[in-house]
């Protein structure tokens, strides 16, 4: 018996065909498939993304300058742990907001999404400049609201280059992510100078204006190469049924849990345990940021020859061993510097390769939402790692013995390596395959 076709079904099919051929509305993504892959416009996207991360993640990396001033001058009665919630939430909320940011990138023109992100970041910093009477206001503005805007910039900046490149994909994403390291190199001393000369209020206002202007110009070039049809599901969690995604998700949680301990505690360790000057201790962060910038670009050059998953696993392994071998057993200047350089190079590779692995395994069509889901792992790792590391140092090490804190960081990074090895096996069991 022939199957009857109703008028409703005919109408629905006609509407679907019309939706496929109609021109995108002004707020929707426009396809640029006529532009060549690995072409000049792709590099414009890369440079724009690099500048966006330079000022979004650069502001996150430079919060320590504000925290020191807040503690010593503006809020002397508040504990450091309370003030540190501004910086913790900047990174944490930015990662958890990666899911809606990825959805916005699918449903709206990425130029509008990134422009909105820059506007939110700039306004948040300017409003924070007037919040000099209560810490909770800074947590809300400089912490939470700023990080929402940063997510709207970070997700497209790290996901769009995968659509524009195949041959140079790892290098392109490495250059974009290197922007955060470059921002950390110069924005921290610049922030210190502005605070010393003008105070935190004008430092926040000037930074907010610069962030808005730079992101507004950069957003003009942040265009999708491929058009993505919006799905009925707001968030598609079906990727969790893929064991490969489970391995990379858990590995990211573990690696991120140990990631921040060297950044937060190496300068304090050098000052309190080794007895180095404050200037030397602060320079360790500069060394890590510089080495991280080199590592993010270098791994992009190397990974095509040995495979992105292989490189990711190697970077995580060496980063963990630099902590356990050079930092944990010794209390010497040379080993601390060696740890800073080696850890900086290879932790930079870990950060830059995650988006490349995602694009290579699951394609570029849904890369924004998949990366948004993955960065939830970074949120979990941040919320677990940073507070736990501080609690171990305070309660077990009594603020002076760093060994348990160092071991915590190195072991969690090593666990991340083990899960990335599981990802490698799940992707291919051929030992010497470039994958």
Image: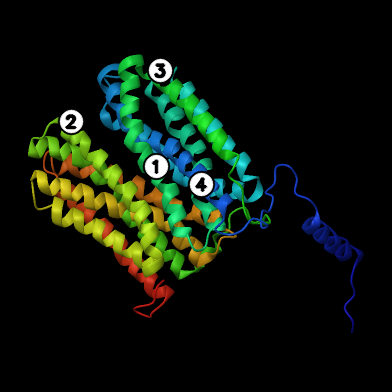
Q: CA gap, disc 1 to disc 3?
A: 24 Å
Labels 1, 3: front one: 1
Q: CA gap, disc 4 to disc 1?
A: 11 Å
Quadrant of the frame with the N terminus: bottom right
Q: Secondary structure at mark 4?
A: helix
The residue that label 3 is drawn on is: 201
Q: Is residue 310 above or below residue 65?
A: below
Labels 3, 4: front one: 4
- Give the residue drawn at x 51%, y 36%: 149
The residue that label 4 is drawn on is: 157
How crowded pointer 3 is (Cα within 10 Å; few <14, some 14-19, many 20+) is rated as some
The residue that label 1 is drawn on is: 180
- Give the residue drawn at x 35%, y 70%: 422
Q: Secondary structure at mark 1?
A: helix
How crowded pointer 1 is (Cα within 10 Å; few <14, some 14-19, many 20+) is rated as many
Q: CA gap, disc 2 to disc 4?
A: 34 Å
The residue that label 2 is drawn on is: 279
Label whose residue precedes the other's in the sequence (3 or 4): 4
Q: Secondary structure at mark 3?
A: helix
Quadrant of the frame with the C terminus: bottom left
Q: Position of residue 197 (x, y in %)?
A: 32, 15
Q: Is residue 361 above or below residue 215?
A: below
Q: Are marks 4 and 1 in contact (CB under 8 Å)?
A: no
Q: CA gap, disc 3 to disc 4?
A: 29 Å
Query: From where the camera sits, is residue 166 visible?
Result: yes
Label whose residue precedes the other's in the sequence (2 or 4): 4
Query: From where the camera sits, is residue 85 visible?
Result: no
How crowded pointer 4 is (Cα within 10 Å; few <14, some 14-19, many 20+) is rated as many
């Amino acid at each position: 018996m022939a199957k009857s076709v109703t008028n409703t079904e005919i109408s629905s099919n006609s509407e679907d065909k019309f939706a496929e051929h109609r021109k995108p509305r002004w707020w929707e993504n426009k396809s640029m498939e006529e532009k060549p892959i690995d072409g000049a416009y792709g590099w414009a996207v890369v440079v724009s993304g690099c500048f966006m991360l330079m000022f979004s993640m650069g502001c996150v990396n430079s919060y320590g300058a504000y925290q020191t001033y807040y503690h010593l001058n503006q809020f002397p009665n508040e504990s450091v742990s309370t003030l540190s919630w501004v910086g913790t939430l900047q990174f944490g909320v930015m990662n958890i907001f990666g899911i809606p940011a990825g959805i916005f990138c699918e449903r709206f023109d990425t130029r509008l999404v990134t422009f909105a992100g820059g506007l939110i970041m700039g306004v948040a910093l300017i409003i924070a400049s007037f919040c000099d009477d209560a810490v909770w206001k800074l947590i809300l503005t400089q912490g939470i609201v700023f990080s929402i805007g940063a997510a709207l910039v970070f997700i497209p900046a790290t996901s769009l280059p995968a659509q524009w490149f195949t041959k140079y994909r790892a290098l392109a994403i490495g250059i974009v992510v290197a922007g955060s390291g470059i921002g950390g190199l110069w924005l921290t001393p610049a922030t210190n100078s502005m605070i010393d000369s003008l105070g935190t209020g004008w430092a926040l206002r000037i930074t907010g204006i610069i962030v808005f202007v730079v992101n507004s110009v950069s957003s003009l070039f942040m265009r999708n190469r491929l058009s993505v049809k919006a799905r009925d599901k707001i968030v598609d969690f079906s990727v969790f049924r893929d064991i490969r995604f489970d391995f990379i998700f858990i590995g990211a949680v573990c690696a991120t849990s140990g990631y921040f301990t060297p950044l937060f505690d190496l300068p304090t360790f050098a000052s309190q345990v080794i007895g180095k000057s404050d200037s030397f201790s602060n320079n360790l962060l500069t060394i890590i940021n510089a080495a991280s910038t080199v590592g993010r670009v270098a791994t992009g050059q190397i990974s095509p020859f040995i495979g992105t998953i292989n490189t990711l696993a190697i970077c995580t392994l060496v980063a963990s061993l630099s902590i356990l071998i050079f930092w944990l057993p010794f209390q010497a200047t040379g080993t601390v510097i060696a740890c800073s350089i080696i850890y900086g190079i290879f932790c930079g590779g870990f950060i830059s390769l995650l988006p490349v692995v995602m694009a290579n395994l699951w394609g570029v069509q849904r890369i924004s939402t998949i990366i948004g889901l993955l960065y939830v792992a970074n949120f979990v790792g941040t919320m677990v790692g940073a507070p736990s590391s501080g609690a171990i140092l305070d309660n077990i090490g009594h603020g002076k013995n760093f060994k348990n804190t160092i071991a915590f960081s190195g072991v969690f990074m090593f666990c991340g390596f083990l899960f990335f090895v599981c990802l490698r096996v799940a992707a291919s069991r051929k030992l010497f395959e470039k994958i």
